[in-house]
Image: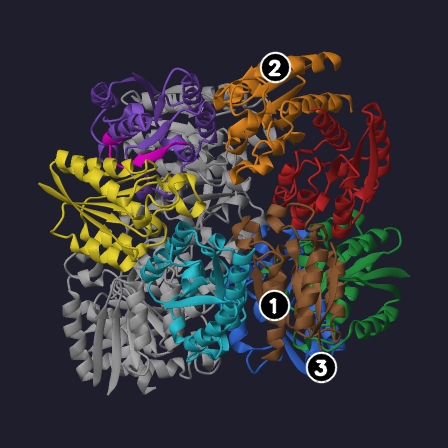
Chain colours: A blue, B green, C red, D orange, G brown, H purple, J cyan, K yellow
Amino acid sequence: MKKILVINGPNLNLLGTREPDKYGDDTLENIKTMLQEKAQKLDTELEFFQSNSEGELIDKIQSAKNQFDGILINPAAYTHTSVAIRDALSAVNIPTVEIHLSNIHAREEFRHKSYTAAVCIGQICGFGKYSYIYGLTALVTHFNQ
Amino acid sequence: MKKILVINGPNLNLLGTREPDKYGDDTLENIKTMLQEKAQKLDTELEFFQSNSEGELIDKIQSAKNQFDGILINPAAYTHTSVAIRDALSAVNIPTVEIHLSNIHAREEFRHKSYTAAVCIGQICGFGKYSYIYGLTALVTHFNQ
Amino acid sequence: MKKILVINGPNLNLLGTREPDKYGDDTLENIKTMLQEKAQKLDTELEFFQSNSEGELIDKIQSAKNQFDGILINPAAYTHTSVAIRDALSAVNIPTVEIHLSNIHAREEFRHKSYTAAVCIGQICGFGKYSYIYGLTALVTHFNQ
Amino acid sequence: MKKILVINGPNLNLLGTREPDKYGDDTLENIKTMLQEKAQKLDTELEFFQSNSEGELIDKIQSAKNQFDGILINPAAYTHTSVAIRDALSAVNIPTVEIHLSNIHAREEFRHKSYTAAVCIGQICGFGKYSYIYGLTALVTHFNQ
Amino acid sequence: MKKILVINGPNLNLLGTREPDKYGDDTLENIKTMLQEKAQKLDTELEFFQSNSEGELIDKIQSAKNQFDGILINPAAYTHTSVAIRDALSAVNIPTVEIHLSNIHAREEFRHKSYTAAVCIGQICGFGKYSYIYGLTALVTHFNQ
Amino acid sequence: MKKILVINGPNLNLLGTREPDKYGDDTLENIKTMLQEKAQKLDTELEFFQSNSEGELIDKIQSAKNQFDGILINPAAYTHTSVAIRDALSAVNIPTVEIHLSNIHAREEFRHKSYTAAVCIGQICGFGKYSYIYGLTALVTHFNQ
Amino acid sequence: MKKILVINGPNLNLLGTREPDKYGDDTLENIKTMLQEKAQKLDTELEFFQSNSEGELIDKIQSAKNQFDGILINPAAYTHTSVAIRDALSAVNIPTVEIHLSNIHAREEFRHKSYTAAVCIGQICGFGKYSYIYGLTALVTHFNQ
Amino acid sequence: MKKILVINGPNLNLLGTREPDKYGDDTLENIKTMLQEKAQKLDTELEFFQSNSEGELIDKIQSAKNQFDGILINPAAYTHTSVAIRDALSAVNIPTVEIHLSNIHAREEFRHKSYTAAVCIGQICGFGKYSYIYGLTALVTHFNQ
Amino acid sequence: MKKILVINGPNLNLLGTREPDKYGDDTLENIKTMLQEKAQKLDTELEFFQSNSEGELIDKIQSAKNQFDGILINPAAYTHTSVAIRDALSAVNIPTVEIHLSNIHAREEFRHKSYTAAVCIGQICGFGKYSYIYGLTALVTHFNQ
Amino acid sequence: MKKILVINGPNLNLLGTREPDKYGDDTLENIKTMLQEKAQKLDTELEFFQSNSEGELIDKIQSAKNQFDGILINPAAYTHTSVAIRDALSAVNIPTVEIHLSNIHAREEFRHKSYTAAVCIGQICGFGKYSYIYGLTALVTHFNQ
Amino acid sequence: MKKILVINGPNLNLLGTREPDKYGDDTLENIKTMLQEKAQKLDTELEFFQSNSEGELIDKIQSAKNQFDGILINPAAYTHTSVAIRDALSAVNIPTVEIHLSNIHAREEFRHKSYTAAVCIGQICGFGKYSYIYGLTALVTHFNQ
Amino acid sequence: MKKILVINGPNLNLLGTREPDKYGDDTLENIKTMLQEKAQKLDTELEFFQSNSEGELIDKIQSAKNQFDGILINPAAYTHTSVAIRDALSAVNIPTVEIHLSNIHAREEFRHKSYTAAVCIGQICGFGKYSYIYGLTALVTHFNQ
């Protein structure tokens, strides 16, 4: 059974309670529940992690080494500013999929650039909570290739 | 039963026969077969279209109005240069998902920018043929929301 | 009697039926009718052409040589990306007026630049269908100078 | 009867006497006469104003409020540098058309950008004195829409 | 008793009568009254000046030398384009505070840059008419340091 | 009685003890005392928070929801690099004022840009410790509008 | 006997009849005759193709696979804007030489950049019709290395 | 006897009384006296003009036509921002020399660019009041060539 | 005996175990041992600190005041993005040397810029673990100057 | 009999002995021998010159005046940085062809720009030693036109 | 008696014999003679130096230390590319005036920037051979201040 | 015994006698003596070379092939402008260390970029004469790895 670490970046703990027009109605808890169900079907085990701290996110990514088979990450705002998270992902070298709730290409110019996507398998954005589902599916499919 | 138009941009007809390290081993025909199977499960009808011509791609997008419920598009190289395809997608206003076989963020600088993604629901890139599967799933899920 | 070729670029065939807030309510057919009336008053003969294909637009521009006295062109999205249409206009060297339905200066940054306007007599933008009328008038006036 | 304020920016008082290859042979007085005739036909009343001073141009634009139904403006060099005139046009919120004698897209790079066009209905450039005629026509047509 | 010159740049004479969503309901006259009251409490004397002309604003700034102890300036649109006003402020070398009614950082990109702020004590923006109050307070406090 | 959270970003804990020519002589403790006095007069309750960690600052901003009526923030160096703090402020949607001790427009080019100011009511910079006083006053005034 | 596909991009069909100062007096037909003679001497077989359509050019490039030993291409205006033609050349992976009649480095800034040259063996520009001769020679020499 | 118009831009009326380290000790009056003496030796007549207003400077430049044989201009801050003064100089087409008291290349980046120098004979900067002397000499020498 | 704080930024805790081609085989522990030996010879005392958190790095830098005579810092990814660490170094004003294991000039463009180096004595990059040795030597030499 | 000066820029003396994957196996001596043979067939006389010094290259170019009918130049690295060599070529005004061994468009961004090509007849790059042959042929053909 | 070193950069040895429309008819020898006459009147001694080599120019500048009281330099093309000549001028710290025959502001964009002017007293450009006269006069005047 | 070539770029021959605040008090001769001592301890032989000429520096670098085991280079101003020196270092492929006396990151923007560092092992800057010592040590250590 594959183990996947689901990492959520800054402000994602606020999901569902605010700005639903941008990020959808679901809370991170809802997404977790939904994703757990999906994981069960895919015979996969998940661990969830959320932090607003760039350093803690890096700590967690590093700790994934030998503990997890894949990473599903929504780096949120750090996507656009963090070379350090990119380096962490690059260093642990675990298959990673980057996801975003909103369509970053339809927002401010500074959200179009991703430091982290270049060291991931791929990127999925714009499908709200379903970005997580598709990202999880993509990771599991990747293991089976 | 929802009808989805699957549009493939320039050079995608060459898939599988060349540069497999970049785009995978599967031909567009394989992807079609695989996607048809998935569509059947999702109770969806697909039509495939591929063209190397920006104009024909626009013609096809326009023709989708009232004929299709969604568009799954891999604009390939035109992603980065075509304002006209962007305008076509914007004009027909049909739910659209943009997909890419390769991870465009891990390639040349000029492939990081997408003119078209901004008028789509979202973008999926980097998962080879599976980008199509996830894109199709995303569209169908979108219809059911 | 002067002959003028009226060229319409990508997505203009959709006029009137969609995004009326951006491009007005009139269809290209309406514009044609209105413009024909104006042409008659100006003792001018018109031929209409619309294509979504950059190549066909170039073919048509080239064919204007020795057949037409002037060109009225709305290159639409190709305004901002097509060096090839610019070169075609420059090569046939027929008096040309560039028109736009919408005010391109009030839209996205990438629509402010025109590759084609530099090889035209002038540019008219922002007056909806009337941009065509003024463009036609400008061409005819140009012939009489 | 509609009243239109015709505003001419810096150096336009020199029209006709110098650099005729760039701006045509007509003096501003000629243009005025020609435009008055056109206005009469369109059952419109005109007031002319020219100044080399950014501040006086702003003063005049402001004074148009409740006095004029439309503004026809050739901001000349201030087109490319004046946020203040843009703000004035935006503040009085009177239908305005921007015109240029020469084709600004065929001149120096710094003349391609317009601060003012974005707050106008549209822009007409490249037709010499006739840019004024078309601009006036466009304004009157706008009132009748 | 300290004397402060309150300088208002282009279009600020229109305050209160137009675009209240951007600049608030108060007229410049209201602001003057309100500011006079505040000045009285701060034992300070004010002189108001408004002009749409860059040159007149510079003349006024220059005349402040030996006449005023401080300048409270809202350069409006000239903030972003006037090296000359910057040089005037720099030349008279009187303590100056720059204020803006609206939050310039939340508007167009070209309004984020300030030529003038660099030669002032500080900048206050976004608080509508209260920007003037805070600016006045800041100047008076500065005198007492 | 309104409650306001006063947030101080990286290195502000060093205030008063170092680089007094840039940031003034007062310690953060002095500022706190001074601000408390002001708050008392304004019938307002304050809570102070300082952290060098982007993540902790975000945590604190998030915790303000339903606990505080306003935020007074000096994001210091994070002003120029943190999309994540911007997103946090945007998410909690509490009236916020951004302040800076020094005049950021008179320093290095990279300090002229603010990611955070765009989601605040306004910004005050350059008045040393008094920037806090004016920021607090601005917040309280905002509540009373 | 080697087979070489000679591809001519947009507006090259107009060669010789217009703008001879920029592109020389020879027609594409003349160039063809001249190049055929050269090909005979080099024991090489040529096929000519010209299109104004980016899509048709891509179609033709793709069709060269297994049919031709080399490609001699003058992408004309598409040189500077077409990622799609670059991708087609890259995909078929046939030895290709890029040629230009005029010296692109001595023309407008936007003609200095070539998307296509990077995937060719080399580039030859500025020698009018002889650019074709040198390009053909270069290809044949390449085969013999 | 040649007549030369000496035009001084914004803030130059303050010369000598402020910022002597940047602009020297001499007042504009001193420079005038010194320049008059030099003019007498060169058998030349001078007229002096200073204004802080861009518009008045343009008015004066325009009035020089048929009245003056040459212009000696120190556009000060407008050097870097005024397309309108450039156009005025270009329109009157009188031999003009641009001068600056300070060395503009040794100051802020935005002072390195000159809109006006391109339409002058030449530019002299960095020699304090002597820049005027050399500029006058250059003009007179130009007449004798 | 001088005391030096050795600060290691994000992901340096992973040293030696991963990506040895980029960063060398040695672990941070090895480097520590090697550096301790060197320190002993230089009659210097070291303290090591590593964190993935920008905030903790700033906390540590601040705590160095009055505790350490020098700082040896490898800010890793934060080199290129952290104004806050720059400000911390600038604030504590302790002699600091910046080091990098890899040659940042031979890597991605975004790694060529250093926010932090400008407030250090100097920078050493590209010598793997020996960058630490040279950095330590440089600091000690600096003390003896 | 035409005389042609063959100029080789910096580091070309090392040809053949190093980095053969980038520049080919042939030494400059080999190229000379091969080119001499070709020259004999073309009834042309050659003189070879190589220098690593920008100044000596300029001296040589200048000396070509009245001594040579054409110049074949491989400016190597100076292509991208030398305005002075461009000016020398422009000054002597002898027909010149620029050549490069490698395909400069397929290398680092800073090698895409050529200061010198703009003042040559044309440019040939990417064909190794044969670039010299084609360049020589191009020059001789140019003489015969 | 003051001694002045007159330094001429690349291609200035060709003066007068070529491109007289750009640089005038006079040879460098003529300029020398003319300048010597002027020097005599100014009781100054001149030494002339011209080189096409950046290195020799630097050598000469360095040798001026303690030998010359001033430098008159026309760095020609090196003006725009040589940090090394800038550093040499900065190092010897002798009063220097930069001159140009042509008006560099009226030529190509890349000639508008001067690396060297920033470390000179001032710059004079556009007056042909007279630029030297004015430059010499400026230096001598500088000595007498 | 390893042989190392120590190369010094433009203006370094002036060391110690001028601008000591920027480059230190020591002459190049002092540095040589100091470095010789260090070399002796490291059982290494040094050869010194200084030139102000880019070409001579390239000649020297080339001559190092088979003569030297390493290069210690301070390219001074050429660091920022010389692609040719970069190519020379790349061609000879001898282990090289780049050094700078001053901290280039704390100086003008144009000194932050290094063309040469990318082809060296590493770069050391900011430690005055000691940069040479550390660079030498780094080279010798490199040999022993």
Q: Amino acid at mark 1?
A: Val
Local secondary structure at mark 3: helix
Using the image as rendered, state which of residue B68 and residue D39 is in the foreground: D39
Quadrant of the drawing holding the C terminus of chain K: top left
Q: Which mark is residue D30?
A: 2
Local secondary structure at mark 1: helix
Q: Which mark is residue G140?
A: none
Name the spot of residue H89 as percent of width and height, x first: 43, 26
Q: CA distance from mark 1 to mark 2?
A: 58 Å
Local packing at callout 2 (Cα closer than 10 Å; few below 14, some 14-19, many 20+) is some
Residue shown at 75% from the left, 36% from the top: C72
Subunit under mark 2: D
Q: Amino acid at mark 3?
A: Asn
Q: Report the span colored magenta.
A: H120-131
Local packing at callout 1 (Cα closer than 10 Å; few below 14, some 14-19, many 20+) is many
From the viewer's perspective, is J130 left or right of C51? Answer: left
Q: Which mark is residue A144?
A: 3
Residue shown at 47% from the left, 66% from the top: J44
Say which residue label 1 marks: G119
Outermost residue to the right: B1
Q: Amino acid at mark 2?
A: Asn
From the viewer's perspective, is D133 left or right of D106? Answer: right
Q: Nearer the viewer, mark 3 or mark 1?
A: 1
